[in-house]
Structure formats: structure tokens, C-alpha cells
Image (spheres, rainbow, N blue to C red):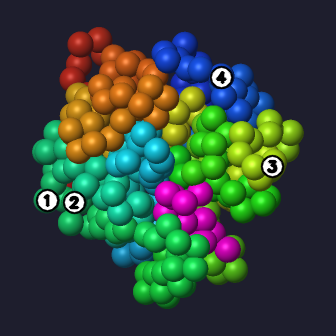
């Protein structure tokens, strides 16, 4: 069942809300770029972004297919990755496994694998449905060396033959091949070079979705053509040049992935495909125990890009209210859920 146009617009409005960020210093990519990014993405997609991504994922990924996901940002001060990206990737993987009966392979930096595994385990435990989806999610380490990454990308593509490739908060190279964080610093050497997968997807005419929030992420190529100069010797833009068929822009990449999961839930008539607000807290707490940090503050409370835990759970709760038929009467527990 397609999402009503009004609901699809509401999902986009919710995931692009701009509350104040705590601990934000000057950077090469400004939070004010969010509106510009979003408008450029809407011009490309010609429809609400989260629902557009959900629609194409459900059209082009069938039961028994494989879905390839990538996330992770490892850098100085972030040795095991950040809280933005992994939570969204795991939540979207769960929605697709339960809703479409697919198998998902999630690739990331080697040091971030325990964070992703922990996030998935926390989500399964909180939702009480581990037996129904967790075994169909595999987390793999991917090389940072460009040559090794090219070889591994080809090997993995041949082995999986995925029906779609989705990136969630995964930094990608600029026109000079350099990968930058939000401060414009060169972090190329520490990134799993999963950008090498995207030319393979393009040649195979496989659906690509890129979820990001700043314009330096894989999939948002071309959305910030006048992005600021970086702070490294390359002298190029911080903007990633890797394009996706559907770019999804949100205040944080987790929120973008949750928006897509919510739209999938609406389209399939299964509200439980979106996790509960209480599960969001479990995921984030488990991730920081595994070593993840807030990507802006570089600290280890269960926060995301300077936004506190109450904000993260509130967004998930609001999305859950939107996907529940009739929005649910006051005081009603979010339905648990997906049919057996």
C-alpha cells in the first residue's frame, strides 16, 4: 500500500527538523546546508525522499534477494566509529529482513564491527524478535586500502549479486579522491572504501540509495556543487562525488534511515517494522559501551551528532505514531507487531 502523499511529506519534514546541536564548532560543512541539500535531492528524486527510497527498495528487492548495506566512520578520536549511521543501518536492515524476507550484508570498518554487532543484538533483544531476523544480518569488515578494497568489492559483488546497495552515513571521496569529515579534515586512510562498490552497482543497474546529512557522504554527490574548501592540502571541496539513484537527506543519517524504515512499514501495512522508541535507547547505549562516540562531541554518552537521548527516542516515537494506523489513540502502546 503506497504511503499517502501527505504522510510521505510528513516523514520528510520530521527527519529534516533542525533542533540546536550541542558542541558544534565551525566546520567546512554548515548545518544550514541541510535545507539546500534537501531541496537539491528533491529536485533529483521528484518526490518525498524517504518514501521514494522505500518504494524503490520494495519494488526492486524481492524475497530471497540480498541487500548490501554500508556504514561507519572511523577517524582520529573516533576509533570505533560514531553513533550516527550504525543505528540507522541496523534498523533499516531489520525492516527489510522482516518486511521483504531478504538477507542483508552490512560492511564497515574492521574496528566498527563490534559496534554494529552490538547494535543489532540490542535491537533484537529489545524488540524480542531475534529469532525472526538476526541470523539474516551479517556484518563484515571491509578494507581501507584502495587496491584491496577494489579487489574485495569485486569479490563481494560476485558472491552476493545484491539487488540494492544502500549507504548510511558513509563518507566518500571528493573529485580529487580525498575523503573529508565535517571539519574538512582528510580521513581517507581510516575509511572502509566501500565507495568502490558503487561503480559495480551502476554497471549492474542495481538500485543505489545514499543516506546522509552533510553532503560529504556517499550517495549525495552533486547536491553541494559549491561546498566549502577543505582544511587539507588537497585544496578541493569536502563534497562527495559518488551519486546514488535516491539520495535521502536528514538532520542525522540515523533519522534518514528511520524515515525509510517508517515508509516501508506504511507501504507493507506492518507498523512493527519500525523499532520502538525504547529500543532506540537500548541501541545507543549498547553502541557506546562497544566504543562508539558522538561524532560531533567525540564523547561517549548515548547521543547522536550533539542531540541528546530524549531527542533520539522522541523522533522514533513520532515516526512510530505516524506509521500506526489512525495514529493510535492516546496512551495506546505501540503495536508489537509484525505478523508471524
The residue tagged with tag 2: helix, strand or loop?
A: helix
Is residue 248 among what the camera can see?
no
Q: Position of residue 44 (x, y in %)?
A: 79, 48
Mark 4 or mark 1, which has the lower sequence index?
A: 4
Mark 4 or mark 2, which has the lower sequence index?
A: 4
The span shown in magenta is 188-199
Q: Please check the rendered image and state whether residue 190 is part of the magenta-colored stretch, yes or no.
A: yes
Which of discs 4 and 2 lies nearer the camera? The answer is 4
Q: Residue at x 13, y 59 (%)?
A: 131
Structural distance between the alpha carbons of marks 1 and 3? 48 Å
Structural distance between the alpha carbons of marks 1 and 2? 6 Å
Which of discs 1 and 3 lies nearer the camera? The answer is 3
- The chief SS type of the magenta part is helix
Q: Residues within 10 Å of mark 4 (few under 14, many from 20)?
A: few
Which of discs 2 and 3 lies nearer the camera? The answer is 3
Pointer 2 residue:
134
Structural distance between the alpha carbons of marks 2 and 3? 41 Å
> Is residue 15 or residue 81 the one in the foreground?
81
Q: Are marks 1 and 3 in contact (CB under 8 Å)?
A: no
Q: Please check the rendered image and state whether residue 164 is part of the magenta-colored stretch, yes or no.
A: no
Q: Are marks 3 and 4 in contact (CB under 8 Å)?
A: no
Pointer 4 residue:
26
Please tell me whether residue 216 is drawn above or below residue 288 in the rendered image: below
Q: Residues within 10 Å of mark 3 (few under 14, many from 20)?
A: some
Structural distance between the alpha carbons of marks 4 and 1? 45 Å
Please tell me whether residue 76 is drawn above or below residue 151 in the rendered image: above
Amino acid at each position: 500500500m503506497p504511503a499517502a502523499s501527505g504522510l510521505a511529506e510528513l516523514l520528510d519534514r520530521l527527519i529534516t527538523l533542525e533542533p540546536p546541536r550541542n558542541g558544534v564548532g565551525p566546520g567546512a560543512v554548515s548545518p544550514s546546508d541541510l535545507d539546500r541539500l534537501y531541496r537539491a535531492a528533491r529536485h533529483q528524486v521528484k518526490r518525498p525522499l524517504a518514501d521514494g527510497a522505500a518504494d524503490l527498495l520494495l519494488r526492486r528487492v524481492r524475497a530471497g534477494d540480498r541487500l548490501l548495506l554500508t556504514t561507519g566512520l572511523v577517524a582520529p578520536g573516533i576509533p570505533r566509529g560514531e553513533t550516527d549511521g550504525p543505528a540507522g543501518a541496523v534498523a533499516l536492515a531489520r525492516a527489510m529482513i522482516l518486511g521483504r524476507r531478504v538477507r542483508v550484508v552490512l560492511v564497515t570498518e574492521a574496528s566498527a564491527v563490534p559496534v554494529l554487532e552490538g547494535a543489532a543484538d540490542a535491537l533484537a533483544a529489545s524488540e524480542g524478535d531475534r529469532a525472526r531476523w538476526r541470523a539474516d544480518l551479517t556484518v563484515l569488515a571491509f578494507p581501507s586500502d584502495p587496491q584491496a578494497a577494489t579487489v574485495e568489492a569485486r569479490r563481494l559483488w560476485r558472491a552476493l549479486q545484491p539487488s540494492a546497495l544502500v549507504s548510511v552515513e558513509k563518507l566518500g571521496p571528493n573529485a580529487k579522491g580525498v575523503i573529508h569529515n565535517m571539519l574538512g579534515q582528510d580521513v581517507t586512510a581510516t575509511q572502509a572504501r566501500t565507495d568502490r562498490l558503487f561503480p559495480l552497482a551502476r554497471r549492474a543497474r542495481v538500485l543505489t540509495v545514499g543516506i546522509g546529512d552533510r553532503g560529504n557522504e556517499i550517495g549525495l554527490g552533486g547536491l553541494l556543487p559549491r561546498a566549502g574548501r577543505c582544511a587539507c592540502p588537497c585544496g578541493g571541496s569536502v563534497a562527495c562525488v559518488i551519486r546514488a539513484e535516491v539520495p535521502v537527506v536528514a538532520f542525522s543519517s540515523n533519522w534518514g534511515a528511520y524515515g525509510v524504515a517508517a515508509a516501508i512499514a506504511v507501504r507493507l501495512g506492518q507498523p512493527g517494522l519500525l523499532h520502538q522508541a525504547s529500543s532506540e535507547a537500548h541501541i545507543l547505549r549498547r553502541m557506546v559501551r562497544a566504543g562508539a562516540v558522538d561524532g560531533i562531541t567525540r564523547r561517549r554518552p548515548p547521543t547522536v551528532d550533539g542531540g541528546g537521548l530524549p531527542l533520539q527516542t522522541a523522533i522514533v516515537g513520532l515516526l512510530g505514531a505516524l506509521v500506526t494506523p489512525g495514529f493510535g489513540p492516546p496512551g495506546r502502546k505501540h503495536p508489537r507487531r509484525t505478523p508471524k
